[in-house]
Amino acid sequence: MPGTRGRIRIAVVFGGRSTEHAISCVSAGGVVRALDRHGYDVVPIGIDVDGRWIVFATDADVLRADGEQLPAVRAAAGRQVVLTADPTAPRLVLRDPTDAPLGELADIDVIFPVLHGPFGEDGTVQGLFELAGVPYVGSGVFASAAAMDKEHMKAQLAAAGLPVGPYVVLRAGESLTETDRQRLGLPVFVKPARGGSSIGISRVDAWADLDTAVKTARTHDPKVLIEAGIVGREIECGVLGRVDAPGAQASLPAEITVDSPTGFYDFDAKYVTDRTRFDVPAVLSPDILEEVQAVAVRAFEALDCAGLARVDVFLTPRNKVVVNEVNTMPGFTPTSMFPRMWAASGLDFPALVDRLVRSALGAGSGLR
């Protein structure tokens, strides 16, 4: 049911319990600013690092990054609420019933979960939305979980005939064998299997440094992925589910060129420093452009994604496209590639956000 004066009441949910909490806050600020107040009543809901849900003021300025100082959700920022799992009840209820009533804020039409990482992008919160019977932006439970876990993501992509690079998965207590080392070669990239924003990732150029890199990754996830380094250009491509027809469509791709002391696209290169060059769109021949877009759409569909995704690939010197990963809730910060690629493709930030929300409303909740 539309909100006040016929507007759609949308809850923008951000923050969360993952290590990508701050980036989620910055992304949410971009989404909140992009929503047209003539068409939307916006209810920002921050989740603090302990998991408390808090209704924020609609002022998105508190969600801006200030240099290296990144925002965070604090429990004192507003009233604490919970999302009920009962689809017949008001969707938001106060955690403390002595607080002032929520009134119309309790009746949410759609949710935009601008959540990155575990406990938000991994199918957990999507399951809650399904139980509550509320439409939401993005992929469903299974696709969100599969894309977050890089082991299962790569297995599904390979099963669909898509090229992925060599990798090894280490579970708790496991270590890399000599056979694995020979197969992977150097350098390798060691990363948490279920993480993002390059947090906990290390580049290893000597096997003597492997144990330290694995320990670093395991501070974020007991399951660790070790990937062979792939020589090639780093290309990203945005994908949107179609509103008016089956299938998906790809944006113009972008290229990332990194000048980082770590030798890869790490957290500082993504969000803090200005030592990374972004070519939007990427300079590609027509046939390679078509191949990158086709692979991106195939990856989106192989994981049963919905709404949106960003597909990251490598383009080797022999022009082979190798899929690196699929991100089901890419960043919406001022420097994020997903909105920039769609802007280059003719869909600006406000139009992109509006399309995502209306697509979610059209899809509804339940099996899709």
Image (cartoon, helix red, strand yellow):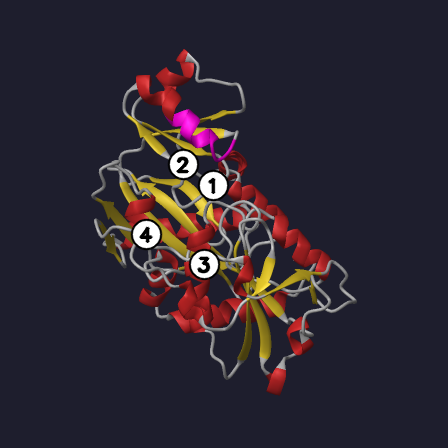
- Mark 2 packing: few (<14 Cα in 10 Å), some, or many (20+)? many
Residue behind mark 1: 195
Query: Is label 2 in contact with label 4 (beta carbons under 8 Å)?
Result: no
**Quadrant (top left/top right/bottom left/bottom right) for the C terminus:** bottom right
The residue indicated by pointer 4 is 271
Query: To which residue does mark 2 refer?
Result: 200
Q: Amino acid at mark 3?
A: Cys
- Crowding around mark 3 (Cα neighbors within 10 Å: few <14, some 14 to 19, many 20+) is many
Q: Nearer the viewer, residue 37 or 251?
A: 37
Q: Is residue 198 visible?
A: yes
Q: Quadrant of residue 229?
A: top left
Residue extending farthest to the top is 178
Earlier in the chain: of badge 1 and badge 2, it is 1
Magenta residues span 213-221
Residue 194 lies, with reference to residue 327, above or below; the image says: above
At label 2, the amino acid type is: Gly
Give the structural element (helix, strand or loop) at label 3. Answer: helix
- Find out whether the residues at labels 1 and 3 contact each other: C-beta distance under 8 Å: no
Which residue occupies 44% across, 70% down? Answer: 60
